[in-house]
Image (cartoon, grey):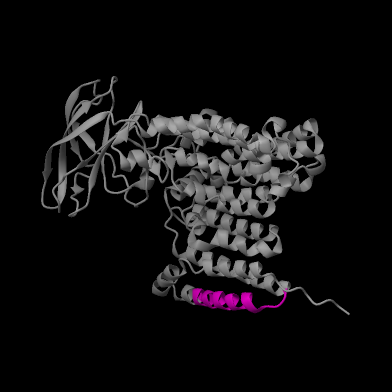
Amino acid sequence: MSAEPEPPTQWHRVLTVLADVSLLIGTREVWTQAATHRLTLAAVISVCYASILVCGALALVVRHRRSLARVDLCVLVTGLTLALCAFVLFHRGSDESALTTQAARDLVAGHGIYGRPWPWLFGHTGIAVTPTVTGGYDYTYGYPPLAPLLTAPLLWLGHGGLPAIAMSTGALLAGTVVLWWLLPVPWRSAATMACLGFSMLTMYARLGYPAILALALMIPVVVRWPRIGRGGRLGPAGVAQAACLGAACAAQQLPWFLAPFLLAGIYAVRRGELGARPAGLVVLRLAGVAVGVWLLINMYFVVSRPVAWLKGIVLPLIQGAVLHGQGLVGVSLYLTNGSDRLDWYGYASLLLLAGLLALFVLFVRRLGPAATVLPWLAFWLATRSQDGYYLMMTPLWLAAAVTAPMAEFAGAWQPFGRRLGGAKRRPARIAAAVLLLSPALASAVLAVTGSPPLRLEVAGVRHDARTLSRLTLRVTNTEDEALTPHFTLTRGQGMYPYFSVLRGPATLPAHATAVYELRPPEGTYALPHKHQQVRLRVFTSSPQTLSSAYVTLPTA
């Protein structure tokens, strides 16, 4: 007599319903656009609405686990279909997709892709540019080369950034399927929700971000990552994970920050299992395969133009982009009038990353499950702390939460285990954490407590009924060193292009005062509406500083 199939657990039903509901977010906007221009797609989206409703009902009433697993598959297919519909309708792209596609075109044409500015990509297309504290903009490609290499075969799709958008969207869909397949059956709907729900990652994919490709490649690395090298052997699966790690690092820089945590964690787990020497050999083989794949992807660029390649792949770290994001830099951007110690935000970020890695090594049994989250804490202190750095890696949080629980680290090796372990050693653990994190905290305090080095006064405004054509300022350098100022006006969180300096010294000497006459970059600047605040911002690059002041302009 055959046993009755087991019913699904209630939490599995709830997870399936949540994944199903998450697909509704942003879908109406897609349908509205399709109903205006693409009626066939609108019909497909309407069918997806029906699928969401039916899956929601079935998730609550099916009687067997296998039946609920089929509902999970239907939710996944619905999410993939909606993502493809959104891709067809919304593919204008961004600076990331424009640069990646242009890099692919130059690669096919036999040109170098690093150190080559492409300002025409950003002309009047509405695509954002990255302003720097030097008063200019970065028009070059600043990522490792895998994304352009994979975009090159898709150039036939059309002009603009569409090839790069297709590449990143395809990577997200493939990564979603891989994560769904690798997770235990009851957790699979969580993959659909994290990757395709909430309209978060699909938006970044449609903007053509190379980080989405890096995310897709990191998914198989992170799933069950503490088991890599178990028994002292990588095996085919471990070699594949190492290869994916190397490829991810060749796609975008974010995996560079996660890799040390994973390698340290694998060493600690394997050392607890095998001892120091076998664990070291496992990590060396893993790192060797990853570095080999990374070098293989980069080799052409290393050989052809090594200096340009090196500067290109580290560009986001050295380009001197202006402050931007939702992190601590908001203090200097919005809550105060600036700081003469902006460099300390960068120092604080690096020190926090180093401190977190050290804490991770010391307390890997406790912090091991958080390996995929800890690196992004450092970005909250960085000069560029935009939320995309966190959002685009969130599926890795899920993969670790499901497949790398704390039990996997119970026997992991911890240095100074006797001195820092046990209930009686809690003060020592707190002291270690304070010691390791204090440098980052001190650097952050220095950054936010800096004072604006330039005192700004509006001396004159030339305007008509709607626009400003000239702005005259009296600027005083309160610092002990000369500064080269670059001026702009902002409303809210965005940054207007830099104004041209028609009169005034390029470099303002220490403790000197000068009058500057500024011209808007397009010749005119639209006057603000009533109650709209305008802020004058002045950046300098050496040292990096920001001086801000609210200014009163005539209203339109």
Residue toward you, 155 or 251? 251
Whether residue 54 appears in magenta in the rendering, the answer is: yes
Q: Residue at x 52, y 75 (%)?
A: 49
Q: Position of residue 73 (x, y in %)?
A: 65, 69
Q: Residue furthest right?
A: 1
Q: Do we see residue 268 in this rendering?
A: yes
Q: Do we see residue 415 in this rendering?
A: no
For the N terminus, the quadrant is bottom right
In terms of secondary structure, what is the magenta stretch mainly?
helix
Boundaries of the magenta span: 44-64
For the C terminus, the quadrant is bottom left
Q: Is residue 434 left or right of residue 90?
A: right
Q: Is residue 78 left or right of residue 336?
A: right
Q: Relative to 134, say whether 465 is above or below.
A: below
Q: Residue at x 66, y 62 (%)?
A: 187
Residue toward you, 263 or 286? 263
Q: Position of residue 499 (x, y in %)?
A: 24, 38
Residue toward you, 101 or 550? 550
Q: Residue at x 59, y 41 (%)?
A: 258
